[in-house]
């Protein structure tokens, strides 16, 4: 009973201290402009595992999902009134990014390839899945996700390729030369190009650009043409940095 009373007094003191420090006795005023968070319900049965969000030229929201393909929504002021349609219900392999090349054509990095998804007959549903490149290695490890693609302005694209996790297995059959080194208690590269930022050329070949990444969370090009990549905390990464990437680094 005494312990509970002491805890109550302590928590009340902390609450008062937190209020007094920033504002004293004055009431807190809301800023004149601020962002409001609204929940947008997805269609029934669609898990909220989102790998990419972009808008097309019509202002429609393109939603790249992990298990339910690609959805497109016509936004509404009321989040519950979004009008959803399915561009494709084919599950994509852990996609982590989307480039809108046109309202009918998207470029998406899957774990095993960079894929162009196209609605060739303009009926609102994708009917062509074109492998732009399959040149990087694949071990089957769940952690080998790829971020991008980012156009370089010359018809090529940058893709950031993640490493494998020691918490998950690799497959018996892999693509590329397999390595068993470096996997004790940390992320590792079991096949080629893992942990790299690469440039994918228009003919589907790969140019290694920069290495040493653990798990790229995103990749962007600045208006001035500088390439920036985020990396994820863990193992040898004490925090989640943002890197300015140049070839050979």
Image (spheres, helix red, strand yellow):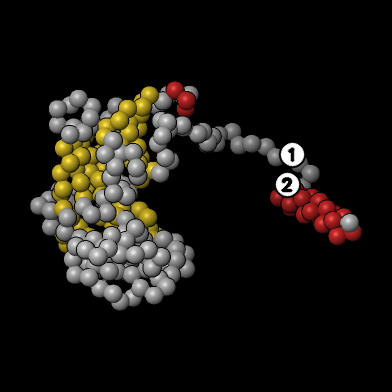
Q: Tell me how many marks there are.
A: 2
| Residue 25 horizontal/vertical position (percent) | 79, 44
Any part of residue 204 in sight: yes
- The residue singled out by tag 1 in the image is 27
Label 1 SS: loop
Any part of residue 244 in sight: no
Q: Answer with left or right where residue 230 lies relative to residue 35.
A: left
| Residue 174 horizontal/vertical position (percent) | 21, 63
Query: 141 or 193: nearer the eye?
Result: 141
| Residue 193 horizontal/vertical position (percent) | 23, 65
Label 2 SS: helix
Q: Residue at x 90, y 59 (%)?
A: 2
Q: Residue at x 42, y 73 (%)?
A: 185
Q: Answer with left or right where residue 89 lies relative to residue 39.
A: left
Residue 148 vertical placement versus 36 (above, below)? below
Q: Are marks 1 and 2 in contact (CB under 8 Å)?
A: yes
Q: Quadrant of residue 217?
A: bottom left
Q: Residue at x 86, y 60 (%)?
A: 3
Q: Answer with left or right where residue 233 lies relative to residue 221.
A: right
In the rendered view of the protein, which quadrant contains the N terminus?
bottom right
Whole-number angstrom distance, CA of label 1 to CA of label 2: 7 Å
- The residue singled out by tag 2 in the image is 23
Query: 164 or 56: nearer the eye?
Result: 164
Q: Residue at x 23, y 27 (%)?
A: 124
Within 10 angstroms of label 1, few (less than 14), some, or many (20 or more) residues?
Answer: few
Residue 212 vertical placement versus 229 (above, below)? below
Q: Quadrant of residue 71?
A: top left
| Residue 72 horizontal/vertical position (percent) | 32, 31
Residue most extreme to the front = 172
């Amino acid at each position: 009973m005494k312990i509970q009373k002491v805890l109550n007094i302590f928590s009340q003191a902390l609450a008062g201290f937190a209020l007094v420090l920033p504002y004293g006795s004055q009431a807190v005023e809301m800023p004149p402009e601020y962002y409001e968070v609204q929940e947008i319900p997805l269609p029934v049965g669609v898990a909220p595992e989102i790998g990419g969000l972009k808008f097309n030229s019509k202002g429609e929201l393109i939603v790249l999902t992990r298990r339910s393909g690609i959805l497109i929504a016509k936004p509404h002021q009321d989040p519950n009134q979004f009008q959803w349609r399915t561009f494709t219900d084919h599950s994509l392999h852990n996609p982590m990014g989307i480039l809108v090349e046109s309202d009918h054509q998207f470029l998406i990095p899957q774990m095993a390839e960079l894929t162009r998804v196209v609605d060739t007959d303009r009926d609102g549903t994708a009917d062509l899945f074109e492998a732009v490149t399959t040149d990087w290695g694949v071990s089957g490890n769940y952690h080998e996700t790829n971020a991008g693609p980012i156009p370089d302005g010359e018809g090529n694209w940058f893709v950031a390729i993640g490493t494998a996790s020691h918490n998950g297995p690799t497959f018996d059959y892999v693509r590329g030369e397999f390595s068993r080194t470096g996997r004790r208690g940390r992320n590792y590269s079991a096949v080629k190009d893992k942990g790299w930022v690469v440039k994918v050329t228009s003919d589907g070949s790969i140019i290694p650009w920069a290495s040493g990444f653990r798990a790229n969370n995103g990749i962007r090009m600045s208006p001035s043409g500088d390439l920036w990549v985020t990396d994820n905390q863990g193992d040898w990464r004490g925090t989640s940095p943002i890197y300015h990437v140049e070839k050979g680094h």
